[in-house]
């Protein structure tokens, strides 16, 4: 699931890096510049799910908030439904929820309990995978309702933090388009 060097360079050039945001030591990878670039946005969306585009996908699940923008576009592209995975307290109907650890403390993410039916094939989408804690919680939430998680796709990987391997160890294939060293 390697992408070409030309594609990597193209996408990297479209991403803005902001050092020490939101706190010292973090290199924030800002995808708003990629989203604002029609060619890079389309390219990223096409490439994210390319290995699965010809197969059966029932839903794309996007993680709040940047996963909504990318996941919505991907769902349109592969003609399937979209499922929002949201921070606690945002969804109006009956929910399933899961706790996950952040750097400081614990948070919860939620999904509508009827967003997927047992056996549906779903692809998880977010902009970036770092430690993998967020994506791991999303995968577990989807499995909790009986969904089959076909893949997890991210534009950016921070391989030094080991998140992609964490998700692969759950038996879920991971696709990332570019990677950056460090945090
Ligand atoms: P993690 O749970 O550690 O894999 O963190 C992934 C989530 O945090 C994703 O939703 C990202 O959007 C966000 N995130 C983590 N690190 C960064 C970073 N360096 N730049 C931009 N977003 C980040």
Image (cartoon, rainbow, N blue to C red):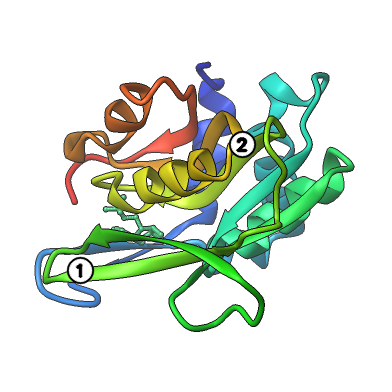
Is 35 left, or right, of 96 in this rendering?
right
Compare residues 91 and 5 and report the one nearer the observer.
91
Q: Reply above or below: 86 against 166.
A: below
Q: Are marks 1 and 2 in contact (CB under 8 Å)?
A: no
**Residue 169 location, quadrant:** top left
Residue depicted at x 47% and y 49%? 141
Q: Reply above or below: 140 against 99.
A: above
> Going by the picture, which residue comes out furthest to the right?
79
Instruction: Indicate the position of residue 5 as horizontal and vertical percent values.
Output: 51, 23
Instruction: Indicate the position of residue 27 as horizontal and vertical percent values.
Output: 24, 61
- Res. 127 mark: none
Considering only order in the chain, which callout, 2 or 1, is on the residue closer to the N terminus? 1
Residue depicted at x 36% and y 31%? 167
Instruction: Indicate the position of residue 106 as horizontal and vertical percent values.
Output: 20, 68
Ligand 1 is located in which of the four quadrants? Answer: bottom left
Secondary element at image label 1:
strand
Residue depicted at x 41% and y 20%? 171
Is 166 left, or right, of 24 in this rendering?
right
Residue ID for mark 2? 147
Q: Reply above or below: 24 against 102.
A: below
Is 17 left, or right, of 30 in this rendering?
left
User: Gap between marks 1 and 2, in whole Å?
Assistant: 24 Å
Residue depicted at x 71% and y 23%? 52
**Residue 162 location, quadrant:** top left
Disc 1 vs disc 2: which is toward the camera? 2
Q: Reply above or below: 14 against 110.
A: above
Residue ID for mark 1? 106
């Amino acid at each position: 699931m390697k992408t070409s060097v030309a594609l990597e360079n193209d996408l990297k050039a479209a991403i803005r890096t902001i050092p020490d945001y939101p706190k010292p030591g973090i290199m924030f990878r800002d995808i708003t510049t990629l989203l604002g670039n029609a060619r890079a946005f389309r390219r990223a969306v096409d490439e994210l799910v390319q290995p699965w585009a010809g197969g059966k996908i029932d839903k794309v699940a996007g993680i709040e908030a940047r996963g909504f923008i990318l996941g919505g576009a991907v769902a349109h592209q592969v003609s399937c439904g979209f499922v929002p995975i949201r921070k606690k307290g945002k969804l109006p109907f009956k929910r399933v929820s899961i706790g996950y650890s952040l750097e400081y403390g614990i948070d919860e993410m939620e999904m509508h309990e009827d967003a997927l039916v047992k056996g549906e094939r779903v692809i998880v989408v977010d902009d970036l995978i770092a430690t993998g804690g967020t994506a791991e919680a999303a995968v577990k939430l989807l499995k909790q309702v009986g969904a089959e998680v076909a893949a997890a796709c991210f534009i950016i990987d921070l391989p030094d933090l080991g998140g992609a391997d964490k998700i692969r160890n759950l038996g879920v294939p991971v696709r990332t388009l570019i990677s950056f060293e460090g945090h």
